[in-house]
Image (cartoon, helix red, strand yellow):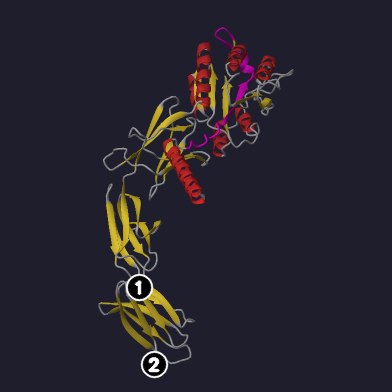
Amino acid sequence: MKLKSEKLKVKRIVFFCFLFLISHSLFPQKLPKQEKPTTRILFVFDASFSMFGQWQSGMKMDIAKNLLMDFLDSLKYVDHIELALRVYGHQSRLNPPGGYPPNHANRDCQDTKLEVPFGNNNILAIKNKLKSIVPRGTTPIAYSLEQCANDFPDCPNCRNIVILITDGIEECDGDPCAVSLALQKKGIILKPFVIGIGLDVQFADAFKCVGKYYNATSEIGFKTILNVVISQALNNTTAQVNLLDVAGNPTETDVNMTFYDDFSRAIKYNYMHTINNRGNPDTIVIDPLGTYRMVVHTIPPVEKSNITFTPGKHNIIAVDAPQGYLYLKVAGGDFKPVQCIVRKSGQMQTLNVQQFNQTEKYIIGKYDLEILTLPRIYLPNTDVSQSKTTTVEIPQSGNLTILKPSEGPGSLYVEEKNKLTWVYNLRENLTQETLVLQPGRYRIEYRPKNSKESIYTIERQFKIESGSSTQVKLF
């Protein structure tokens, strides 16, 4: 009865194990999704004296404030977003009583302030602050951008975006382009958006190096541009990477791709390239605001720089990455693992150290192989072709045991065509050593440590055969 119960228990365990395996094969575990980053948008608003100017239906300042406040309402229910407001040119008057000297040497070029810091549900605070702002001063764009670096608190999973709204160019001898580039290189912000309000076309070039420039020539245009900018700021876009074979077809796959930010050099994405169920390179999601350098970790790696993406569209990146296979084989197995240094033909840089009896994938071309046997084997200009396997086979080694009567210096040489080539120095303090050698003819030259005359040199000639063991006595 007890035996019957035990058998039943075993059957149940086997049955549940079977169910577990089936469920995991038919319904694979879903990996946890990466948490969506918070997008932090800092509006940098121009409140310089020129914003008193007329623009279509009214004063530039009033139109810009009203359109921006209306637009902020559309962001009330957007998840994973934080807003802030920095204003410049609103604290110090450009023309105080008595006036400035003609060259405006005393204008306030540090007139900028973070009026509303980042936070949740602060749209009302931003709108109230906008209502109270009156244009007064000058246009310190470079200094304002520089101060933006302090406006973004530390956040490991945030995208920091600046939207500059202005009707004029730098007036304080600063360099907005240099400041913007420095902030991007440090990874503090992504490439800024610049919206020009009624700016002359000739000023457009002054902002193209600062960020992505949009020229609002009308009130309707300003509203449309705001929508476009926010859409690009909030939405990721899709792309696929075509790893091209030698025929130009996107057949290469199963390799990691790293996307680096071109300015900050920071690692932004890692994707293991995949061919999806439809036979196409799989779609990846990427932030369209950056400029990227992509490294495909083939052997050797291939790179593509200055990659930009068109927001809202499916982007395709094509990279030449034709590959073939190299299989290293020891005939009949070996006494210990064998490795091979792989270098690009004619170059000294080591690309890979490949184990024997393994297959590795390489970009097509010619490679120099240095096989770490005793003695070493050199195979220059080994060809790797598209989608083919190049097999390199070496003979099985043999075992050598060296017995010395006492400690002393010695060395091992391979003998070929009446020439001795050094292979190995014996360990002077050992009286017994075991080496693994390739088949061939060898000599050992040895002298006991206490024999101080060269005439006491002992020489032994011997032969190593594949798979065999040889003992050499030096006495």
Say which quadrant the C terminus sits in.
Answer: bottom left
Q: If you read the primary sequence from the N terminus, does the residue marked by circle 2 or circle 1 appear first?
A: 1
- In the displayed structure, 99 sits above or below 258; it is above
Mark number displayed over residue 200: none
- In the displayed structure, 180 sits above or below 218; it is below
Q: Is residue 442 left or right of residue 260?
A: left
Residue 307 seen anywhere in this rendered image of the structure: yes
Residue 271: x and y in percent read 45, 39
For residue 281: magenta? no
- In the displayed structure, 151 sits above or below 186; it is above
Quick one: label 2, few (<14), some, or many (20+) residues within 10 Å?
A: few
Q: Nearer the viewer, residue 28 or 450?
A: 28
Marks 1 and 2: in contact by CB < 8 Å? no
Residue 429: x and y in percent read 49, 81
Quadrant of residue 80 within the rendered picture:
top right
Q: Is residue 63 left or right of residue 29?
A: right
Residue 112: x and y in percent read 67, 26
Amino acid type assigned to the residue bearing label 2 in the image: Ile
Q: Secondary structure at mark 1?
A: strand
Magenta-drawn segment: 29-58
Disc 1 target residue: 437
Amino acid type assigned to the residue bearing label 1 in the image: Leu
Q: Is residue 313 left or right of residue 332?
A: right
Disc 2 target residue: 455
Q: Secondary structure at mark 2?
A: helix
Residue 227: x and y in percent read 52, 18
